[in-house]
Image (cartoon, grey):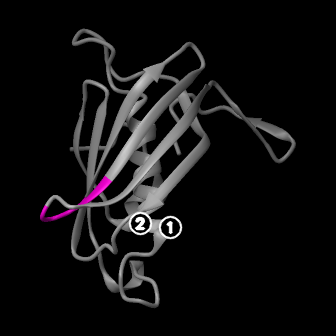
Amino acid sequence: MQFARHVPFIHLLGAQLLRFEEGECEIALELRDELNNSWHVAHGGVIMTLLDVAMAHATRTPRSVEQGPDPRGVVTIEMKTTFMRPALGRIGCVGKLLHRSASLAFCEGTVFDAAGERLAHATGTFKFLSGLPAGGRRIQSPDASD
C-alpha cells in the first residue's frame, strides 16, 4: 500500500503503510540498529516520527466512500508524546482522527510492539494549509504532509 503523501523521511526509515481508512492510519516499521539509541532500543525520535506521520495521515482519510483523501496540505502544530516501554523488533503505530474542523485536526496515536503491548502514546494538533511560508517565500504544495 502506498502512503497518501510522499514523505521522504518516512521512506528513509523504511516504514510501511498498512491501513488508511475511516479516520485511521496504521503504519509499521522493522527496527534496525541505525534506528536505535545507545541503549539498543528504538530512538525516541523514530517513535515520535511514526506517531506524527500516522496522525497526520489520519487527518486526510476520506470523509466518505465516494471521496478520496483530503487534498489539503497539513503540518503539525503541537504534539505531546508519552513513552511507556522500550521498543524492539517490529513495531506498529495507529493514528486516529478525533475531530476535524475547517482548519484544524485533533488526533491521537499509539505505538505497539508485535505482542500488542503499548510502547508510546501521543496527541497532536494539525493545521490544514494550501502553502507553507518558509525561507522568505511561500512553498506551494497542497498535497504536502509532515
Residue at 53% x, 15% y: name it: 101
Q: Position of residue 113 (x, y in %)?
A: 21, 64
Q: Which residues are magenta?
A: 111-115
In this picture, residue 139 sits left or right of residue 62: right
Residue at image coords 56%, 47%? 79
Vertical order, 45 against 123 (above or below) = below
Please, which residue is most extreme toward the left here? 115
Is residue 33 left or right of 141 when viewed as pictured? Answer: left
**Location of residue 124 in the rendering, given as x and y in whole percent from the top left corner:** 52, 40
Q: Main secondary structure of the magenta part?
A: strand
**Residue lying furthest right in this view?**
136
Screen quadrant of the N terminus = top left
Say which residue label 1 marks: 45
Asked if the residue under mark 2 is in contact with the one under mark 1, i.e. CB atoms within 8 Å, the reply is no
Q: Quadrant of residue 68?
A: top left
Q: Which residue is mark 2?
A: 12
Mark 2 burial class by Cα count in 10 Å: few <14, some 14-19, many 20+: few
Which quadrant of the figure has residue 76?
A: top right
The residue positioned 83% from the left and 48% from the top of the image is 135
Mark 1 or mark 2: name the one nearer the start of the chain.
Answer: 2
Q: Nearer the viewer, mark 1 or mark 2?
A: 1
- The Cα–Cα distance between marks 1 and 2, rounded to whole angstroms, is 14 Å
